Image (tube, rainbow, N blue to C red):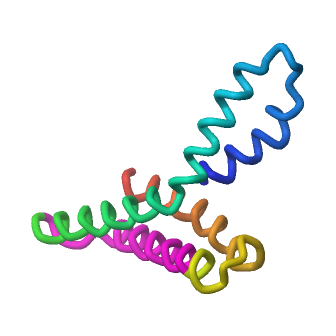
């Protein structure tokens, strides 16, 4: 979700800042470029961390259905990301909308899981 929001903030607000805020604009865009460049890596780390978290908790505490749902959504998002980046190779379309909606759903499911 952060990738989407960072780009949105850049488009709606950062790009409209006056010239005297150039240092802030440059710093924000550098942060944005780093985030976008490593988006796939962050996703991979998130999936591996989620699977590890699930495995450890399954071994010590058993299954929690909310965690299983969150893990399923995370894997679904990863699958869509792999599809979009390596199979479809277009960063537009229905798959991207579903990817973003699923990311929002994941955040909600993680909050429910933690509560």
- Of all residues, the one furthest to the bottom in this rendering is 87
- Residue 77 location, x and y as percent? 53, 72
Residue 63 versus residue 40: which sits nearer the camera? 40
Residue 90 coordinates in the image, percent (x, y):
72, 76
Farthest-out residue, top: 20
In this picture, is 35 found above or below 101? above
- Taken as a whole, is the magenta stretch helix, strand or loop? helix
At horizontal 60% and vertical 86% (from top left) the residue drawn is 87
User: As drawn, is 32 to the left or to the right of 71?
Assistant: right
Near-viewer residue (74 or 115): 74
Q: Which residue is nearer to you in this view: 108 or 45?
A: 45
**Residue 61 location (% of width, % of height):** 14, 65
Q: Residue at x 74, y 27 (%)?
A: 25
Tell me which segment is drawn in magenta: 61-82
In the displayed structure image, the side of residue 48 where residue 10 appears, left or right: right
Q: Residue 47: where, in percent of width, then height?
A: 38, 66
| Image vertical order of residue 16 relative to residue 89, above or below | above
Query: On the rendered image, what quadrant is the N terminus found in?
Result: bottom right
Q: How many discs appear?
A: 0
Identify the residue shown where x is 75% and y is 40%: 9
Q: Is residue 87 left or right of residue 14?
A: left
- Residue 17 placement, left or right of 9: right
- Residue 48, image quadrant: bottom left
Asked if residue 76 is positioned above or below residue 104 in the image, the reply reads: below
């Amino acid at each position: 979700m952060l990738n989407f929001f960072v780009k949105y903030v850049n488009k709606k607000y950062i790009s409209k800042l006056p010239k005297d805020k150039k240092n802030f604009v440059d710093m924000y865009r550098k942060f944005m470029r780093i985030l976008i460049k490593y988006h796939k890596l962050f996703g991979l780390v998130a999936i591996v961390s989620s699977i590890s978290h699930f495995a450890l908790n399954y071994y010590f505490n058993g299954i929690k259905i909310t965690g299983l749902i969150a893990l399923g959504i995370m894997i679904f998002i990863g699958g869509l990301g792999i599809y979009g980046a390596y199979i479809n190779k277009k960063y537009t379309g229905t798959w991207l909308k579903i990817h973003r909606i699923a990311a929002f759903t994941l955040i909600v499911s993680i909050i429910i899981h933690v509560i």
